[in-house]
Amino acid sequence: MPEIKRIGVLTGGGDAPGLNAVIRAVVKAASNSGIECVGLEDSFDGLIEPGRSRVLTPRDVTGILRLGGTILGTTNRGNPFEYPIATSDGVHDYSDRCVEMFHKMGLGALIVIGGDGTLAIAHQFFDRGIPIVGVPKTIDNDIMGTTNCFGFDTAVDFATDAIDRLHVTAEAHHRIMVVEVMGRYAGWIALYAGVAGGADAILIPEIPFDIGVVCERLMARDRWGAKFSIVVVAEGAFPKGGEISLLQAAHGAHVERLGGIGAQVCAALADQTGKETRSVVLGHLQRGGPPTSFDRALATRFGGKAVELVKRGEFGTMVAFEPPAIVARRLDEVVGKTKTVPMDYDLLLTAKALGVTFGD
Ligand code: F6P
């Protein structure tokens, strides 16, 4: 294998706290091994035109460890293999252009930091001959093959804090508070934040819910004197026999946008319990802010491991957390799959044992 002297790094998909920590770790670890890093802007868009990339030195990444967002920019609009785009010199096939630019830029490998969609694209580029190492990112924690993605812990921490705040006002007003959290088709954020925040009901996509069961649980609390309740609803949760609530259907390069189920659950609970209810959507607040120390450490380990895999020539891989180790997984074994909450998951069973209802 020829020695690699220059690599590219990009961030794709929705942002997650810890992206900058990975970029910093990649740049520092690579630089200390005599490898130059080129930061590509706005995901694979940075491989289209030369002006959308820049060399990153350790000086450029100093002080970004604690910052949310990504200094490289990102996008979650569609797949470059499916959508031709117009560049300054005409309409090109996005993927062909990316491969061509990768070589023109003198890159020996590409570190792709992204979620399921971005990693699937990375895998396609690997099949086209680009040496790729993936780094799993998402607040949803739904990537196969890794116990944790960075960003998840920060999102859960934020949602838990929000639930704590809602608890006091719910109790003061004897209300039911419904909190809608993100997570797409997986209930990880709802489960962890719900348990950590002491929710009475947690509704997740893995368990279609019966609103009558939820009402019964909340009214039972009322009867024994707890006149308030907290209900955490994952954006992808849906009633038995019903469908996921969408804010916007998929169109063109845009994936479908989930949302609205919190308000629906809130209205149904008000109707069926006769209690005052209010709902809150935490939305993108869950993706902002500084990463937790756990996410900073995980992101740093991922970045360091990614550079190690580049140096060893282990391409077509993704770094992963298999406690206590950071390991390499084959991309083809993890892409195209969604890691959902298993029905025998300890935290789920423990929550049920404590009396939390999941509406089933
Ligand atoms: O995948 C991360 C995520 O935040 C999901 O939880 C959410 O459904 C989606 O991205 C929102 O995407 P957008 O930023 O495009 O609204």
Image: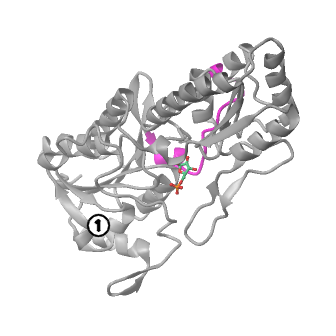
User: Which residue is identified by label 1?
Assistant: 102
Residue at 59% over, 61% down: 255
Is residue 47 among the parts visible in the rendering? yes
Residue sticking out furthest to the front: 173
Q: Is mark 1 within 8 Å of ligand 1?
A: no
Residue at disc 1, secondary structure: helix
Establish if 146 lies above or below 172. Answer: below
Establish if 20 lies above or below 49. Answer: above
Residue at 74% over, 40% down: 266
Residue at 14% over, 45% down: 58
Establish if 259 lies above or below 347. Answer: below
Location of the C terminus (image quadrant): top right
Mark 1 packing: few (<14 Cα in 10 Å), some, or many (20+)?
Answer: many
Residue 217 lies, in percent from the top left, at 81, 23
Residue 167 lies, in percent from the top left, at 61, 24
Tell me which corner region of the image, top left, top right, bottom left or bottom right, holds residue 140: top right
For the residue marked with disc 1, what is the amino acid?
A: Phe
Quick one: 321 or 164, which is closer to the camera?
164
173 sits to left or right of 72: right
209 sits to left or right of 61: right
Is residue 129 among the parts visible in the rendering? no
Tell me which corner region of the image, top left, top right, bottom left or bottom right, holds residue 289: top left
Q: Which residues are magenta?
A: 329-347
The question of residue 189 being in magenta is answered with no
Tell me which corner region of the image, top left, top right, bottom left or bottom right, holds residue 94: bottom left
**Color scheme of the displayed model:** one colour
Residue sticking out furthest to the bottom: 90
The question of residue 344 being in magenta is answered with yes
Residue 160 lies, in percent from the top left, at 53, 28
Quick one: 164 or 159, which is closer to the camera?
164
Residue 239 lies, in percent from the top left, at 81, 42
